């Protein structure tokens, strides 16, 4: 009889513990809204004091941009998969690697072009004062995002050892 009581107490404890974890980890992310970083487009819209019409236009621009970026990322992922499938190819041709890396470079170019025109579209919905402030925001973001050292070189790895030089 005492063995059953211990099992019932243990079972009750596990049910309570599971309920606690389910409550804390399964609740919507909106509950922690103040702890999350602000989304970039919300930040921009707030900084530029967009009105309702501008917000609607920006939402359309963002939806199109996210669709295009997803498409480009999927294409890029497929090309990189194709490239790294060649690792085990015993008759690897340099032309194959060159062709795939060129296609990857073209996709990277397409990605950067899409980002540029996305920001250009947002700037087009700004009035003159907002446009000036938008330029400042973008320049600041580019400076903060540029982790490269002098002359566009990356900083050395923390352990001081980099990859061997390529010939």
Image: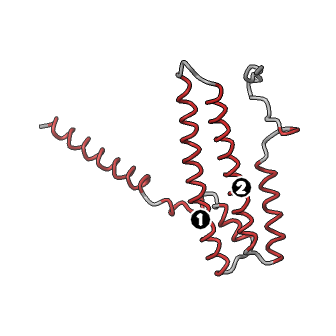
- Residue lying at 83% horizontally and 63% vertically, measured from the top left: 136
- Residue lying at 56% horizontally and 24% vertically, measured from the top left: 87
Q: How crowded is mark 2: few (under 14 residues within 10 Å), some or many (20 or more)?
A: few
* Residue 162 placement: quadrant: top right
Instruction: Give the x, y percent position of residue 76.
Output: 59, 44
Q: Residue 53 carries which label?
A: none
Q: In which quarter of the image is the N terminus?
A: top left
- Residue lying at 77% horizontally and 55% vertically, measured from the top left: 141
- Residue lying at 32% horizontally and 50% vertically, measured from the top left: 16
Instruction: Give the x, y percent position of residue 37.
Output: 63, 57
Quick check: 70 left or right of 143? left
Asked whether 54 or 37 is in front, the reply is: 54
Callout 1 secondary element:
helix
- Eyeballing the image, is 123 above or below 116? below
Disc 2 marks which residue? 113
Quick check: 44 left or right of 155? left
Asked whether 103 or 167 is in front, the reply is: 103
Which of the two labelled residues, at mark 1 and mark 2, occupies the earlier sequence position? 1
- Eyeballing the image, is 154 above or below 33? above
Q: How crowded is mark 1: few (under 14 residues within 10 Å), some or many (20 or more)?
A: few
Disc 1 marks which residue? 64
Q: Which residue lies furthest to the right in this view?
A: 150
Callout 2 secondary element:
helix
């Amino acid at each position: 009889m005492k063995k059953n009581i211990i099992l019932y107490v243990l079972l009750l404890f596990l049910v309570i513990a599971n309920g606690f974890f389910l409550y804390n980890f399964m609740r919507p992310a909106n509950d922690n809204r103040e702890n999350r970083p602000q989304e970039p487009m919300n930040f921009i819209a707030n900084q530029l004091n967009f009105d309702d019409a501008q917000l609607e236009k920006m939402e359309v621009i963002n939806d199109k941009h996210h669709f295009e970026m997803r498409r480009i990322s999927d294409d890029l992922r497929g090309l990189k998969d194709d490239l790294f499938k060649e690792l085990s190819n015993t008759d690897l041709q340099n032309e194959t690697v060159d062709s795939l890396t060129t296609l990857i470079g073209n996709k990277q170019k397409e990605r950067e072009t899409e980002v540029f025109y996305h920001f250009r579209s947002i700037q087009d919905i700004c009035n003159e004062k907002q446009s000036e402030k938008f330029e400042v925001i973008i320049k600041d973001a580019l400076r903060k995002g540029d982790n490269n050292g002098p002359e566009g070189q990356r900083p050395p790895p923390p352990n001081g050892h980099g990859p061997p030089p390529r010939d």
